[in-house]
Image: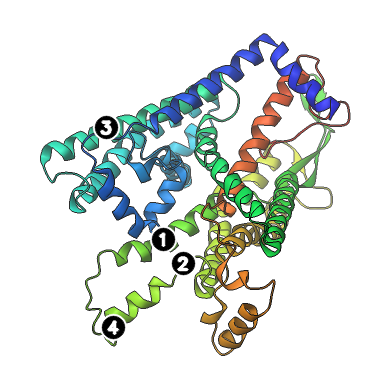
């Protein structure tokens, strides 16, 4: 601990690093201040009533990444969601359009050009999304159904999104860490005080089972965070050798190195995609007109089924796991082209010992990648499900055949009653939130560590090693 506190002191002894840290904190404060400025013309009471009905829909996923701004329709209601969407679209388009692929391979100049395209696409997506949000607000009585309200809402929310994008880029360029990730981090961590307050309330109740439940929750979260850190820093090192060759009069090559492949190469993207897909049924339910007095009609049956289709429902969890696995393989196939990697190795005189260059190398890398992706998909599914089950429970009564007896057993057995219903907390630090929080914290601390070591200061681990972020 002494080395840790010494590293914290060193952070503020380096003028440039201190300036970057305070600059980052200042812009994060500006972002949080904007969360308390509501867009003009919003009826807050009606918005609260509407939100109680749509919190489990796709809008709830959007609210997670906006840091609660969407729930209050602040000027930063969309947060960085349009920018993230634009970045993912541009990343996927590089595999389709050769012109974008060439730009990506041009180094810093190409990266800046792609960033410019991302900004333009962000503005277009923000304008499109805010127009939908404005009409949704007007249709639900949150605002007046007039052209003035629609125009003002679109202009305000789009401008807020562009400003948030600018804040993120300024943090990345002149602060510490990735600006967009830190803005999401700040939006999620703002709910921590409320969660701590609920935990303290449970502890003060004096109920033995409540105290044991809180302790179990804390132990599970600490263990899960440690598990996330372990997996996110894990690497499969593929040995690479470079043959000696003559360049002019010099003999170069003959080096031995490794190609580090992450276990979780897809990051949190598959969980985000899966959560968004599963939020669509709840969103569509808002537009289905049905007669509640006729429960036998197909519309009533569909609505009844999907009203229970949420976190904790066995069918929901099964589909959730399947989508996470599917999107993990799909996304890694897009971002890591084994044929291209093998071809680049061959062009630069590199090869894997014992593996022939070219197609054989691509097949070998594909085998390793498939195994790593399988482990990564299982890891993402576990991290996404465990907190959700602990907080929201697992509705065993919905299981066919054995659901009834299991539900009766858990509800009647002391210490197991939380399984069908959850632990009764209102805050939600689910797997997606934990992955983002831990990952962003690792990346930011790793950057600070690098800055300290570069200036001949000891890092957070002293001389015993180096902290490593997800991207290192």
Badge 2 is on which residue?
Answer: 310
Distance from Cα at disc 2 to Cα at disc 3: 33 Å
Q: Picture coordinates of residue 205 (x, y %)?
A: 63, 56
Circles 2 and 1: CB atoms closer than 8 Å: no
**Residue 317 falls in which quadrant of the image?**
bottom right
* Rendered position, 264 above or below 173: below
Name the side, left or right, on which 28 lies relative to 304: right
Residue at the spot 43% in from the left edge and 41% down from the top edge = 66
2 or 4: tag closer to the N-terminus: 4
Residue linked to disc 1: 279
Give the mark, 2 or 1, whose residue is nearer the N terminus: 1
Observer-side mark, 2 or 1, equals 2
Point 44% across, 32% down: residue: 114
Q: Which residue is mark 4?
A: 298
Residue in view at x 60 percent, y 42 percent: 437
Lower sequence index among marks 4 and 1: 1
Q: Which residue is mark 3?
A: 156
> Going from the N terminus, do you reach mark 3 or mark 4 first?
3
């Amino acid at each position: 601990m002494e080395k840790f506190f010494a590293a914290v002191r060193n952070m503020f002894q380096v003028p440039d690093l201190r300036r970057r840290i305070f600059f980052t904190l200042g812009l994060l404060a500006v972002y949080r201040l904007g969360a308390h400025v509501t867009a003009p013309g919003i009826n807050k009471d009606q918005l609260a009533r509407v939100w109680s009905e749509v919190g489990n829909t796709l809008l709830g996923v959007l609210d997670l990444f906006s840091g609660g701004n969407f729930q209050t329709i602040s000027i930063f209601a969309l947060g960085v969601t349009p920018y993230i969407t634009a970045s993912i679209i541009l990343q996927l388009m590089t595999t389709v359009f050769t012109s974008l692929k060439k730009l990506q391979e041009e180094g810093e100049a190409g990266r800046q050009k792609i960033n410019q395209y991302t900004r333009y696409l962000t503005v277009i997506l923000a304008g499109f999304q805010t127009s939908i949000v404005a009409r949704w607000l007007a249709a639900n009585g949150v605002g007046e159904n007039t052209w003035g309200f629609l125009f003002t809402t679109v202009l305000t929310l789009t401008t807020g999104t562009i400003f948030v994008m600018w804040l993120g880029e300024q943090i990345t360029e002149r602060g510490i860490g990735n600006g967009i990730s830190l803005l999401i981090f700040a939006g999620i961590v703002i709910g921590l005080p409320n969660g701590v307050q609920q935990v303290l309330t449970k502890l003060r109740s004096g109920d033995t089972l409540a105290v044991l439940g809180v302790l179990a929750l804390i132990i599970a979260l600490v263990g899960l965070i440690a598990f996330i850190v372990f997996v996110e820093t894990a690497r499969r090192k593929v040995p690479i050798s470079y043959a000696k060759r003559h360049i002019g009069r010099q003999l170069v090559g003959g080096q031995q190195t490794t190609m580090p492949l992450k276990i979780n190469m897809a990051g949190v993207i598959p969980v985000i995609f899966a959560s968004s897909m599963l939020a669509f049924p709840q969103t569509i339910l808002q537009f289905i007109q049905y007669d509640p007095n006729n429960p036998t009609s197909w519309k009533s049956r569909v609505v009844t089924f999907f009203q229970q289709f949420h976190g904790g429902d066995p069918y929901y969890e099964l589909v959730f796991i399947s989508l996470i696995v599917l999107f993990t393989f799909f996304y890694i196939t897009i971002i890591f082209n084994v044929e291209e990697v093998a071809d680049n190795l061959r062009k630069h005189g590199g090869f894997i010992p014992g593996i022939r260059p070219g197609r054989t190398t691509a097949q070998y890398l594909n085998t390793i990648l498939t195994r790593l992706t399988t482990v990564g998909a299982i890891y993402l599914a576990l991290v996404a499900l465990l907190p959700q089950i602990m907080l929201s429970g697992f509705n065993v009564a919905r299981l066919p055949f054995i659901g009834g007896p299991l539900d009766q057993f858990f509800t009647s057995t002391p210490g197991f009653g939380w399984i069908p219903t959850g632990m009764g907390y209102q805050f939600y630090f689910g797997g997606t939130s934990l992955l983002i929080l831990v990952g962003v914290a690792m990346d930011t601390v790793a950057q600070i560590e690098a800055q300290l070591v570069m200036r001949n200061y000891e890092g957070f681990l002293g001389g015993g090693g180096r902290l490593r972020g997800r991207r290192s």
